[in-house]
Image (spheres, grey):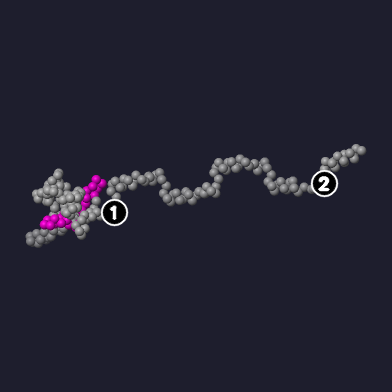
Amino acid sequence: MATKIVDSNALDSALSAFEGYVMRKSSDLPLIFHGTIATKPATVSNASAVASAEILYCTADHRFYARNGSSYYNNWPGRDLYQHLATGNAYSKLYYKSTTNGYELYTIDSAGGLVKIPADYYNKSEMDTKLAAKANTSTTYTKTEVDTKLAAKANTSTTYTKTEVDTKLAAKANTADVYTKTTADSTFMKTANYPVMTEAEAIALVNELFA
């Protein structure tokens, strides 16, 4: 393999460009803040707060402040990513607010105000609430399954219950023990018609026979 000589100036230039790219990309990432305050702190130190200080947004003057305990600071490590060092104006970029359920996304509008961006996801508390209102699939039918089962059923208005059927059947005779109307008509109604004597005629006939 041929040995290549690297120009130190070119290498420095390339590394500088890469470092600038990384810094730009890092500055584009959402920054975390920990809450808001409604009024500007009465006393603000120009010293630099420790790195673990809370970052709070003041809705009164549209600036970020660091808070460590009960003390407020104008400066903290990374402040230049949040707001302009000279004016203190917050940058119009994305910010994450830390909450007990995760993070909420905010940005700075054209007037310098903090605006919450509607989330396209549920936080843990919202998810727990929604899941608690749902039944397990192992103990429920899907809509398709319910539709299939209902399609195999008749409406109650057009059917008898088992009790109703039993009651109606109990009032009926077995076919083996009865004649149908057709059978009865054929057996009893189609015989020859004979004259029928009245009681008076029968008595007169007997008297005549034994006179």
Amino acid type, residue under disc 2 in the picture: Pro
Q: Residue furthest left?
A: 8
Position in image of residue 60 (x %, y %) = 18, 53
Mark 2 touches mark 1? (CB < 8 Å): no
**Is 25 rendered above or below residue 53?**
below
**Residue 182 can be seen in this image:** yes
The one of 182 and 116 positioned closer to us in this rendering: 116
Query: Would residue 11 be seen by someone viewing this image from the given angle?
Result: no
Q: Residue at x 31, y 47 (%)?
A: 127
Return the residue nearer the eye: 173 or 133: 133
Pinpoint residue 81: horizontal percent, then vertical percent. Answer: 15, 55
Tell me the amino acid under the disc marked 1: Asp
How packed is label 1: few (under 14 Cα within 10 Å), some, or many (20 or more)? Answer: few
Q: Is 150 left or right of 6, judged from the image as shown?
A: right
Q: Is residue 196 left or right of residue 34?
A: right
Q: Earlier in the sequence, mark 2 or mark 1?
A: 1
| Residue 141 as seen in the image, left or right of residue 88 | right
Residue 26 in the image: state x and y as whole percent: 17, 55
What residue span does the magenta drawing correspond to?
82-103
Residue at 68% in and 46% down: 180
Judging by the rendered image, the residue that carries numbered circle 2 is: 195
Mark 2 element type: loop
The numbered dot on residue 120 is 1
Which sits in the foreground, 94 or 69? Answer: 69
Question: Which mark identifies residue 64?
Answer: none
Q: Which residue lies at the image location 67% right of the left edge and 41% below the top edge?
A: 177
| In the image, residue 92 lies in the stretch drawn in magenta | yes
Farthest top residue in view: 210
- Quadrant where the C terminus sits is top right
Residue 7 belongs to magenta span: no
Q: Residue at x 64, y 41 (%)?
A: 173
Image quadrant holding the N terminus, namely: bottom left
